[in-house]
Image: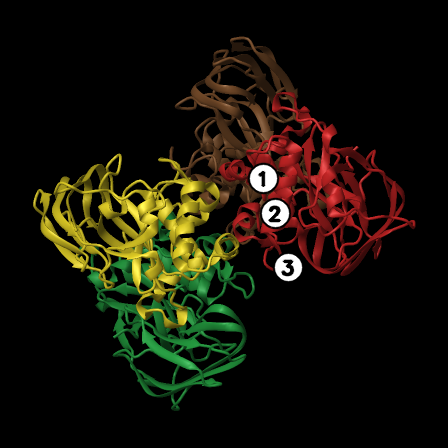
Chain colours: A green, B yellow, C red, D brown
Amino acid sequence: MMQFHVRSEMSYRVLKPSTIILNIHALRTSNQTILSETFQVKPSIRCEEFQSVSGENRFVRLDTGKAKELLVSYNATVQTHPTIISRKDMEAVPISQLNQSVIPYLFPSRYCQSDRVGRLAWKIFGDLSHPYQKVVAISDWIFENVEYLRGFTNSETSAYDTITQRAGVCRDFAHLGITLCRALTIPARYFSGYASHLEPPDFHACFEAYIGNRWFIFDPTRLAPLNGLVKIAAGRDAADASVASLFGWVQGGDIQVSCKPAVSGFKPWTHRQSTQRGLSLDG
Amino acid sequence: MMQFHVRSEMSYRVLKPSTIILNIHALRTSNQTILSETFQVKPSIRCEEFQSVSGENRFVRLDTGKAKELLVSYNATVQTHPTIISRKDMEAVPISQLNQSVIPYLFPSRYCQSDRVGRLAWKIFGDLSHPYQKVVAISDWIFENVEYLRGFTNSETSAYDTITQRAGVCRDFAHLGITLCRALTIPARYFSGYASHLEPPDFHACFEAYIGNRWFIFDPTRLAPLNGLVKIAAGRDAADASVASLFGWVQGGDIQVSCKPAVSGFKPWTHRQSTQRGLSLDG
Amino acid sequence: MMQFHVRSEMSYRVLKPSTIILNIHALRTSNQTILSETFQVKPSIRCEEFQSVSGENRFVRLDTGKAKELLVSYNATVQTHPTIISRKDMEAVPISQLNQSVIPYLFPSRYCQSDRVGRLAWKIFGDLSHPYQKVVAISDWIFENVEYLRGFTNSETSAYDTITQRAGVCRDFAHLGITLCRALTIPARYFSGYASHLEPPDFHACFEAYIGNRWFIFDPTRLAPLNGLVKIAAGRDAADASVASLFGWVQGGDIQVSCKPAVSGFKPWTHRQSTQRGLSLDG
Amino acid sequence: MMQFHVRSEMSYRVLKPSTIILNIHALRTSNQTILSETFQVKPSIRCEEFQSVSGENRFVRLDTGKAKELLVSYNATVQTHPTIISRKDMEAVPISQLNQSVIPYLFPSRYCQSDRVGRLAWKIFGDLSHPYQKVVAISDWIFENVEYLRGFTNSETSAYDTITQRAGVCRDFAHLGITLCRALTIPARYFSGYASHLEPPDFHACFEAYIGNRWFIFDPTRLAPLNGLVKIAAGRDAADASVASLFGWVQGGDIQVSCKPAVSGFKPWTHRQSTQRGLSLDG
């Protein structure tokens, strides 16, 4: 069991009355408890929280009204108690017996064109027999072949580009992981969260793969320990789990994010520890 | 109120034990009642029906086992009683008040990269004030600018291509309609269905746009009367509402589809009738 | 007859011995005379000038050797005496009689995928009968539909993107013009040059279309008067006429460019003047 | 020294007076002598032969006039006397000393977006030191990783797709080879030719890489022996060396191609023989 203080602050300049949809609240799952949280917008405007149909996001919709400058801040203390499963206890479930609710995560999505990379995925990873082995190999392959590079990609970049261009940020790494998994008929989805020990601090993106009967987290960037994550959202890809969606005429300003262990004694997993067993925050 | 006999038959050649997910059953909505239906697979194999989380699909999962040849047939008599709303009774609802459940249909998806066509969409349709007017204009623009042409596109073709290449089939027309709507912040989704008067008979694809507080159907191909549709599924795009998804090693054979009025006196709407009022099968 | 002082200065930081190929010299054509020019690299390194096979570029190849910092400067006084032809004197030459040497400029190239935009081009411009009319209409359409916006595109952006994304810089405008011309079977190529009255001063890109028996210049950005251009190069697209190609490990620094009338009395053409008659620097 | 009878026949249906540009004649180089040739079009129409500026194509332009059906046939007896150079005699020439005329073959082109695959190419092939070794490794990699599959790709497919989609025909294999070479700053170009022992008989595409001071042929499909090739054209990519370019309204019909040794005793090279030494038809 771990405990983290998470915080995010963002400012907006509003040029015309607009709507902003934020997705920055820590999620409530059976593996993640929110001990306390505050969400504040200055000046005070109309805000409304809601969950997506799938229940894997907590959105807040802000109606800017006539406000010109907005300052949004979110603070929470979150307890995570991930399920940890050793490699040998994970089953390989065939599609014919797969939990029905995860089937949509086999389909391609905006940034994850799994329908176009099948041959490549089978060529590189097809000989591995167990899905967990495959996902570990995918995650390693991305780490080894894609360069972490800020400013190279943008919000339109998709896995189909990253697989050739070989550079990007956490979002691009996650999209590529998802795409390769789906191409091998392993359900996979985007994970958005707060991450302890991430330098520089920022929102983080990883991916979840469905193995046996559970979603496990993988981080092909290796930039943050898996046991230091606090989940914000899951979705098909970044289109579903964007930190902020702006409708109208708004300019985003600075973003400050932090995620710190709330109690002493937190021991971040090494990469090696992460590959011997799976970690799930999905409940 | 209309009534239709719908039927589809498809055959598969199974080369290795595989899983097939079909999405060919007529949907149950408050605007569509299934009076009777039969679903048969020969030889008899394990089949399982389930709905997607969003409730907008009825999937059947088939586990081929050792069967080598499959013959699937679906027959139904379906009553549709669409909601019909005249143009002047449709409100324009701002995003700040939009039904939360439809917000995901504002986001880009695999075949509908609405994030990349914003300038174009605003340039062409931005001056129109009412969302219904915009969607009618989008649908007309597609009809006038995109050529209906079999064999030009394939299952990887997306709206980003069709907007320039200007040729495709109903699926491509629908994807382009969805994309342009979302770019204008009008929620839109893929509609898959049976269609009376479609020549040659086949599954049909249209799109739904959310105007006021309801999903309305638009058919930019103008190949079938709106009041002759029977809904199978709705989804982000064809990735969510594919007629058949094959996992394993299976070859699809012939497909036979039909949709016929079950009672005399059915009067297909003309295109003109379709633009004066909206038709919804969504309940 | 016009006369211009042109100047460009660029600096490079060399991290490993590298080769730089520059394309910044004013071209010698029967419509453009170089009255004087100096080209200097500090420190002094091995430089070699050569022309491309087509004769439409003057390249300089620099072998950095062990130099760590390079300062390149080019100065020239150039007299241009463009051929000016009134609209009514331009013939429409069918492909069967087209000068053979221009046929390669009908084919698609890296940034100008004319093979993919045929339907769109014929739909928008197909009804115009004379090629000059078509090219003027293309140039106007680009001006009206594409936003001049720095930082939106990069060196990988091609006309296939710009036609939908509708934003870019002079290079993107030129690529789109070339692409639409070729799709209509009008030979077209990239023009790189110095431009008087361009704000802020920079290298400029336009395009040339082959009408009758001559290459005419078009500038869909309308940012510089056509009679204030000094030609550096022509090519299939920017891949052929890049200002600098770097091989090795070199970082480009600041670029300073200027182009000023060398004698008093230069009267920049208005846009209107540019559409009544064609201007050619091709000889 | 080898000798081949080559033949091609193609038919066209002309719906409106059109222009056809063919590129099917065997090229004359210092390594390839045309002993005899006939070119015939029925009915007799206006034809005109010309070479591209680069001299690496022999085009024929046909003006269909009012002809409705065209039958084109080309027959030639060609002697090839390739230059063969053993691996150890090939120098690695740095860009700073590269023959100027080949520099354009370092730049990206329509189907060879070498500017987008640099990281991937360096990652896979960067450790090899000699350019010949690199090109052999590229050719082997393509053979091993891309499936030869008819009907998967079309005339718009480019190397950027093939590198991920991993399937295609000789044209796609050649484009990918060119792209990877250029990304490693090895000049490379498209080779179009007749090929002995190709099954089924057809036009063939390979690629040439410039090593030392000469163009060498590589065939990543391994479908034809290198010493059984008769060169038709070289170009940046298929856009420059297309068998037929149609302008107007013409439909292509059947194509018959053959290439047979004209004297007994021709011994096709094995793949192994092809990798020990380079073969050049470029003179």
Label 1 amino acid? Leu
At numbered mark 3, what does the secondary structure look like: helix, strand or loop?
loop
Could you tell me how many numbered marks the image carries? 3
Percent of width and height locating residue B219: 33, 47
Percent of width and height locating residue A89: 22, 68
Rendered-image quadrant of the C terminus of chain B: bottom left
Label 2 amino acid? Ile
- Circle 3 crowding by C-alpha within 10 Å: few under 14, some 14–19, many from 20: few
Q: CA distance from mark 1 to mark 2?
A: 10 Å
Q: Mark 1 and mark 2 in contact? Answer it, CB < 8 Å.
A: yes
A174 in relation to D135, above or below: below
Badge nearest the viewer, 3 or 1: 1
Give B80 or D83, whichever is nearer the viewer.
B80
Label 3 amino acid? Arg
Percent of width and height locating residue A203: 45, 74
Q: Residue C180: give its label.
A: 1
Q: Residue C142: give its label.
A: 2
Q: Residue B29: give its label.
A: none
Residue highlighted by disc 3: C150
Q: Earlier in the sequence, mark 1 or mark 2?
A: 2
